[in-house]
Amino acid sequence: MNAPRFSMLELREALEASWDTATSYGGVSETGNPALGQCYPTSWVVQQFFSEVEIVEGEVWTGKTVEKHFWNILQSQGNEYHIDFSWRQFPAGSAVRSFKIRDRETLGDGPATIKRRELLLERVTSYLAVKKTE
Protein backbone atom coordinates (compact mmCIF):
# COMPACT_ATOMS: atom_id res chain seq x y z
CA MET A 1 0.00 0.00 0.00
CA ASN A 2 1.39 3.39 -0.95
CA ALA A 3 -0.22 5.31 1.88
CA PRO A 4 1.02 8.66 3.10
CA ARG A 5 3.15 8.31 6.20
CA PHE A 6 1.49 8.89 9.52
CA SER A 7 2.96 8.52 12.96
CA MET A 8 2.18 5.46 15.06
CA LEU A 9 0.20 7.72 17.40
CA GLU A 10 -1.95 9.00 14.54
CA LEU A 11 -2.47 5.45 13.33
CA ARG A 12 -3.44 4.27 16.82
CA GLU A 13 -6.01 7.08 17.09
CA ALA A 14 -7.48 6.14 13.71
CA LEU A 15 -7.64 2.46 14.64
CA GLU A 16 -9.37 3.11 17.94
CA ALA A 17 -11.90 5.41 16.24
CA SER A 18 -12.60 2.72 13.63
CA TRP A 19 -13.19 -0.32 15.86
CA ASP A 20 -16.67 -1.76 16.36
CA THR A 21 -18.42 -5.12 16.28
CA ALA A 22 -18.04 -5.33 12.48
CA THR A 23 -14.24 -5.40 12.85
CA SER A 24 -14.03 -7.53 16.01
CA TYR A 25 -13.55 -11.28 16.04
CA GLY A 26 -16.94 -12.96 16.18
CA GLY A 27 -18.63 -9.57 16.58
CA VAL A 28 -17.66 -9.51 20.26
CA SER A 29 -18.35 -6.40 22.26
CA GLU A 30 -17.88 -5.42 25.90
CA THR A 31 -18.70 -2.06 27.41
CA GLY A 32 -15.49 -0.26 28.37
CA ASN A 33 -13.30 -2.65 26.35
CA PRO A 34 -13.25 -1.40 22.72
CA ALA A 35 -10.05 -3.36 21.94
CA LEU A 36 -11.74 -6.72 22.56
CA GLY A 37 -11.48 -8.92 19.47
CA GLN A 38 -9.64 -6.27 17.45
CA CYS A 39 -6.11 -7.71 17.60
CA TYR A 40 -5.73 -9.41 14.22
CA PRO A 41 -7.26 -6.79 11.93
CA THR A 42 -5.41 -4.11 13.91
CA SER A 43 -2.03 -5.82 13.52
CA TRP A 44 -2.71 -6.36 9.81
CA VAL A 45 -3.61 -2.68 9.26
CA VAL A 46 -0.48 -1.56 11.14
CA GLN A 47 1.57 -3.68 8.73
CA GLN A 48 -0.11 -1.99 5.75
CA PHE A 49 1.07 1.43 6.95
CA PHE A 50 4.44 0.31 8.33
CA SER A 51 5.70 -2.47 6.07
CA GLU A 52 8.81 -2.98 8.20
CA VAL A 53 6.76 -4.54 11.01
CA GLU A 54 5.68 -8.16 11.16
CA ILE A 55 2.54 -9.72 12.59
CA VAL A 56 3.03 -11.84 15.70
CA GLU A 57 0.71 -14.64 16.82
CA GLY A 58 0.94 -15.57 20.46
CA GLU A 59 -0.70 -16.95 23.54
CA VAL A 60 -1.68 -14.74 26.46
CA TRP A 61 -2.36 -16.08 29.95
CA THR A 62 -5.12 -13.94 31.48
CA GLY A 63 -4.95 -15.50 34.92
CA LYS A 64 -7.88 -17.75 34.04
CA THR A 65 -7.51 -18.79 30.41
CA VAL A 66 -5.02 -18.85 27.55
CA GLU A 67 -6.12 -16.62 24.68
CA LYS A 68 -4.80 -16.35 21.12
CA HIS A 69 -3.57 -12.82 20.40
CA PHE A 70 -1.96 -10.90 17.54
CA TRP A 71 0.27 -7.83 17.59
CA ASN A 72 3.22 -6.38 15.67
CA ILE A 73 6.95 -6.55 16.10
CA LEU A 74 9.70 -4.40 14.67
CA GLN A 75 13.15 -5.95 14.56
CA SER A 76 15.96 -3.43 14.39
CA GLN A 77 19.67 -3.71 15.11
CA GLY A 78 19.21 -7.00 16.95
CA ASN A 79 16.37 -5.71 19.14
CA GLU A 80 12.68 -6.58 19.09
CA TYR A 81 10.13 -3.84 19.67
CA HIS A 82 6.60 -5.06 20.35
CA ILE A 83 3.75 -2.83 19.14
CA ASP A 84 0.36 -3.79 20.52
CA PHE A 85 -2.56 -1.38 20.21
CA SER A 86 -5.14 -3.89 21.45
CA TRP A 87 -3.37 -5.28 24.54
CA ARG A 88 -5.73 -3.47 26.89
CA GLN A 89 -8.43 -6.00 26.03
CA PHE A 90 -6.76 -8.26 28.60
CA PRO A 91 -7.07 -7.93 32.39
CA ALA A 92 -4.21 -6.46 34.42
CA GLY A 93 -1.56 -9.08 35.16
CA SER A 94 -1.98 -10.91 31.84
CA ALA A 95 1.23 -12.20 30.30
CA VAL A 96 2.46 -13.46 26.94
CA ARG A 97 3.29 -17.16 27.17
CA SER A 98 4.69 -17.69 23.69
CA PHE A 99 4.70 -16.11 20.27
CA LYS A 100 5.87 -16.58 16.70
CA ILE A 101 6.22 -14.23 13.76
CA ARG A 102 3.69 -14.97 11.02
CA ASP A 103 4.79 -15.32 7.42
CA ARG A 104 3.07 -12.43 5.65
CA GLU A 105 2.94 -14.40 2.41
CA THR A 106 0.95 -17.30 3.91
CA LEU A 107 -1.52 -15.72 6.33
CA GLY A 108 -4.32 -18.03 5.18
CA ASP A 109 -7.08 -15.63 6.19
CA GLY A 110 -10.63 -16.80 5.54
CA PRO A 111 -13.33 -14.66 3.92
CA ALA A 112 -14.75 -13.31 7.20
CA THR A 113 -11.29 -12.28 8.43
CA ILE A 114 -10.43 -10.66 5.10
CA LYS A 115 -13.70 -8.71 5.26
CA ARG A 116 -12.95 -7.49 8.81
CA ARG A 117 -9.39 -6.42 8.07
CA GLU A 118 -10.35 -4.70 4.77
CA LEU A 119 -13.20 -2.85 6.51
CA LEU A 120 -10.84 -1.67 9.24
CA LEU A 121 -8.26 -0.55 6.65
CA GLU A 122 -10.93 1.36 4.74
CA ARG A 123 -12.15 3.11 7.90
CA VAL A 124 -8.63 3.96 9.09
CA THR A 125 -7.63 5.31 5.67
CA SER A 126 -10.74 7.50 5.57
CA TYR A 127 -10.18 8.73 9.12
CA LEU A 128 -6.57 9.67 8.37
CA ALA A 129 -7.53 11.39 5.12
CA VAL A 130 -10.00 13.61 7.00
CA LYS A 131 -7.43 14.34 9.73
CA LYS A 132 -4.86 15.32 7.12
CA THR A 133 -7.19 17.98 5.70
CA GLU A 134 -8.07 19.47 9.09
Image: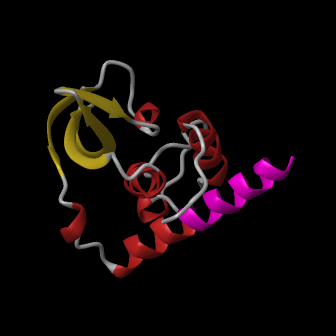
Horizontal side of 81 relative to 4 (left or right) equals left
Q: Nearer the viewer, residue 2 or 105?
A: 2
- Which SS does the magenta portion mostly show? helix
Number of labels in the image equals: 0
Question: Is residue 22 visible from the viewing direction of this image?
Answer: no
Instruction: Place residue 61 in its image quadrant.
Output: top left
Q: In the image, is residue 132 part of the stretch drawn in magenta?
A: yes
Q: In the image, is residue 40 part of the stretch drawn in magenta?
A: no
Residue at point 59%, 53% (across, down): 19
Segment tinted magenta in the rendering = 120-134
Residue at point 78%, 48% (across, down): 131
Residue at point 28%, 48% (across, down): 54
Question: Is residue 133 visible from the viewing direction of this image?
Answer: yes
The vertical placement of 120 against 35, above or below, is: below
Q: Position of residue 24 (x, y in %)?
A: 48, 58
Horizontal side of 25 relative to 134 (left or right) equals left
Instruction: Place residue 125 in its image quadrant.
Output: bottom right
Q: What residue occupies the far right of the structure in this picture?
A: 134
